[in-house]
Image (spheres, rainbow, N blue to C red):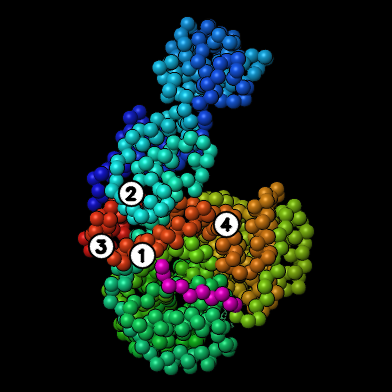
Amino acid sequence: MRPEILYPLFAPVTSLPGIGPRFAQLIAKVAGAHVVDLLWHLPTGLIDRRYAPSVAEARPGSVATLTVRVDHHLPARTQRYPYKVICSDETGELDLVFFHAHRDYLEKALPVGSTRIVSGKVEVFDLHLQMTHPDHIGTPEEAADLQIVEPVYGMTAGLAPKTLRRAMQAALASVPELPEWLDPSLLKSRGWPPWKNAIIAAHAPKGPGDLEPTTPWRMRLAYDELFANQIALALVRARWRRLPGRRIAAPGRLRRDAVSRLPYALTGAQQRALGDIVSDMASDGRMLRLLQGDVGSGKTVVAFLAMLDVVEVGAQAVLMAPTEILARQHHATIAPLAEAAGISVALVTGRDRSKERRVALEGLKSGSAAIAVGTHALFQDDIEFRDLAFAVIDEQHRFGVHQRLALAAKGHAINVLVMTATPIPRTLMMTAYGDLEVSRLTEKPPGRRPVDTRVVSIERMGEMVERLAAAIASGARAYWVCPLVEESESVDLAAATERYEGLRARFGERVGLVHGRLKTAEKDAVIHRFASGAIDILVATTVIEVGIDVPEATIMLVEHAERFGLAQLHQLRGRVGRGGLQGVCVLVYQPPLGETAKARLNVLRETHDGFRIAEEDLRLRGAGEVLGARQSGLPAFRLADLGAHADLLGMAHDDAAMVVGKDADLASARGQAIRSLLYLFERDAAVRTTRSG
Ligand code: ADP
Ligand code: MG
């Protein structure tokens, strides 16, 4: 249950005075629907209104707060002219200028003969000092409220800064004192304020330096958020560790035989990863390990070999892929190797009533099928295993690991290996997985030539098409990936379709189109035609990322490459030049390209090291962009900026490990305070994993 002290913060913003449903909708757009969301919406700038000169002294171009007498009103002669209110002090005259003015309102706000405080930008026009649409108009009693440094917030159309500020002030007034969840010695050594002071200071900048991520208050808030994230992960992990393990102590005969039958030698990285996995499984604890490596680095083979130990002790293993295409590919890789060892592999991808599926399910139930490969359909209720002991989860690019762990935790003492092709930087990995054990395949199988990568302007489209025609004439096959338009699949599709039509006009029948809206069977049919060589050019939206494997394809052309994450581009590039042929990757950009964008694309020309590429992307674009926000599923932070606060993440990780190590049920006084922190950052699902949750 959420602690009562937090109720006001989780009330809808309409609970704030003066905020009705209409404003609430706009506020929800910029910040969120609850009071707490306003607190997390930190200012991005400020306006200093403390400059209060006389009219004669006011510097044109500056923001000033002036005390003036209202002399007379000059209503607009026609719609085209502004309404003017002529004011003055003893040093000179100031015209207030209003377009589309409401006369009633102005006569009330600025009665002739009264003294008023006006704040806004002063300018000179026609030799007159004027202020167009003052930001604030007040009475002399309100001077102290107006002559301030005003925070500036990210806005949306229709929401007046004044309204947002009013809501913000009310939200800040409702901030409770919360019990301290941080270690007092940390606060002292860092000079960080208590939480309530930090949130108030963050919204009250006095100068530009106060908006920096390195101020004590912003650091404290960032740390709180990272600490909540790390505590939540540590709790899930601690629960995992409490579950009984399953020791798989096989002599390793099947595995060694299979290795000797492989047409190649394992790389050093593959051997090390396999060693890690085998020894994890042979220990008493429950295995939870991440296997990271580019597409084609040989993860599937490693996973398969590890499965053989499980099979050898008479238990079963599954490999779960995110899509049906990938599941079928894994099956195609594994089945021949398994059959050579006399092991039968079941493929489970759908819910259909086919004979094939029935046979597969029977095999899993009886144990005659020792290995299953499939999609999440593997975890449907009607699927029974005789003795499942090992699950390999191929995440490819998505990160749903904790939900899937929950799934895998059902009933069985299953060892889990998560595979990912995304080279996630260490910092990001820590936010997504906590201290998961990791094996990395940093070394490629021998004989792979680096893909020749070029960065080309779209203005050279004609030339590119001619080169493509020449390459195809000599037998090449090419992917043509179309622009990724943010958050809109239908727009993506329109662009891809248009390009497809254009290429059809030039190349005729030998062009295919594949996208996310196609039915699986249709998609498979097109891909099959590309794989078999019936078509030469496959126009695609980014669906090809999640697994199309055509070794004969050698050209990868990506339009609007500047819109992709580097890790994504690197993965697309990994699709070509796999069959021992020289691959070419053409990154087509739309000029003009800014300095950062240019530097980003050049990183891909300079290196093929996926981990370095991901680190660079993190440095150049920040965490949210690294993997393409729409598909990453990584936790998003509102206060922490992983570029600026990376060192805090390491601290938060260690701090969380210590807390959970000593007090996994958050029962101590600090543990209780940490519960409030978890609720504050809506990580309360983790609280329920404690015994007294
Ligand atoms: P991943 O799962 O990491 O994408 P795979 O395991 O599918 O990679 O391997 C890609 C291809 O490389 C497969 O055809 C596999 O047979 C081959 N392969 C794997 N390991 C080696 C190796 N050590 N030497 C040569 N080829 C390898
Ligand atoms: Mg693979």
Q: Secondary structure at mark 2?
A: helix
Q: Which mark is residue 680?
A: 2
Circle 1 SS class: helix
Quote the CA–CA distance across marks 4 and 3.
Answer: 37 Å
> Residue type at mark 4?
Arg
Q: Looking at numbered disc 3 in the image, what kind of residue is underneath it?
A: Asp
Q: Are marks 1 and 2 in contact (CB under 8 Å)?
A: no
Residue 337, position as x, y percentages in the image: 50, 87
Q: Quadrant of the C terminus?
A: bottom left
> Where in the figure is residue 410, as x and y percent of width and height?
29, 71
Label 4 and label 2: CA atoms lie apart by: 29 Å
Residue 537, picture quadrant: bottom right
Please tell me which residue lies in front, 596 or 210.
210
Note whether 110 is above or below 325 in the view shown: above
Does residue 413 appear to the left or right of 447 in the view shown? left
Which stretch appears magenta? 435-444
Secondary structure under tag 3 reads loop
Residue 613 in percent (x, y) is at: 60, 64
Which numbered disc flags the more N-terminal residue, 4 or 2?
Answer: 4
Whether residues under marks 3 and 1 lie with C-beta atoms below 8 angstroms apart, the answer is no
* Mark before the other along the chain sequence, 3 or 2: 3
- SS class of the residue under badge 4? helix
Q: Is residue 685 magenta?
A: no
Q: Are marks 4 and 3 in contact (CB under 8 Å)?
A: no
Q: Which residue is mark 3?
A: 665
Q: CA distance from mark 1 to mark 4?
A: 27 Å
